[in-house]
Image (cartoon, rainbow, N blue to C red):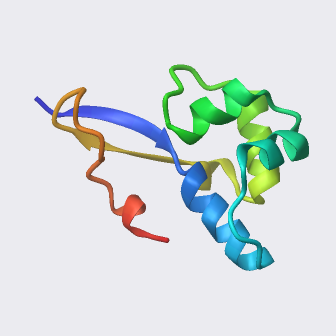
Amino acid sequence: MPKLVIQNRITEHLAIKARKEGSGRYTQDEIMEATGMSRQTVSTHMRNKVLRYDLETIATWCHFLNISPEEFFTWGEVEDDSEAEMKSPLLATA
């Protein structure tokens, strides 16, 4: 049975930010240094393994990525817990 899920678009926006700035790609260490977030927070968010979002953390990501909260999230349906990709048109944009 399909299940609705909400995920972040951090990796997509990191790639956009890196392209705009002409830098390769961001490392977790660079993100930690620029944002003050812990390694665990950065890693968990980048892997979309967040169970509960913290408003301050969302604001920090949005400020770092220069995006709005609306751009931060995407949602869609998955067939079950084991299906990794969502059926959302937002994931197709780059």
Q: Residue, x 72% and y 51% (percent of image)? A: 27
The answer to whether residue 90 is left or right of residue 29 is: left
In this view, 51 is above or below 66: above
Q: Can you give x and y, in whole percent of width and height, for residue 3 in the image? A: 23, 31
Quarter of the picture holding the N terminus = top left
Comparing 35 with 40, the one in front is 40
The answer to whether residue 45 is left or right of residue 64 is: left
Q: Can you give x and y, in whole percent of width and height, for residue 84 in the image? A: 29, 40
Q: Can you give x and y, in whole percent of width and height, for residue 51 in the image? A: 51, 20
Labels in figure, total: 0
In this view, 13 is above or below 63: below
Q: Can you give x and y, in whole percent of width and height, for residue 22 in the image? A: 77, 79
Q: Residue, x 78% and y 27% (percent of image)? A: 38
The answer to whether residue 32 is left or right of residue 74 is: right
Residue 59 falls in image quadrant: top right
Residue 2 falls in image quadrant: top left
Comparing 19 with 24, the one in front is 24
Q: Residue, x 23% and y 38% (percent of image)? A: 78
Point out the residue furthest to the top here.
52
Q: Residue, x 71% and y 67% (percent of image)? A: 17
Comparing 25 with 1, the one in front is 25
Comparing 88 with 41, the one in front is 41
Residue 6 falls in image quadrant: top left
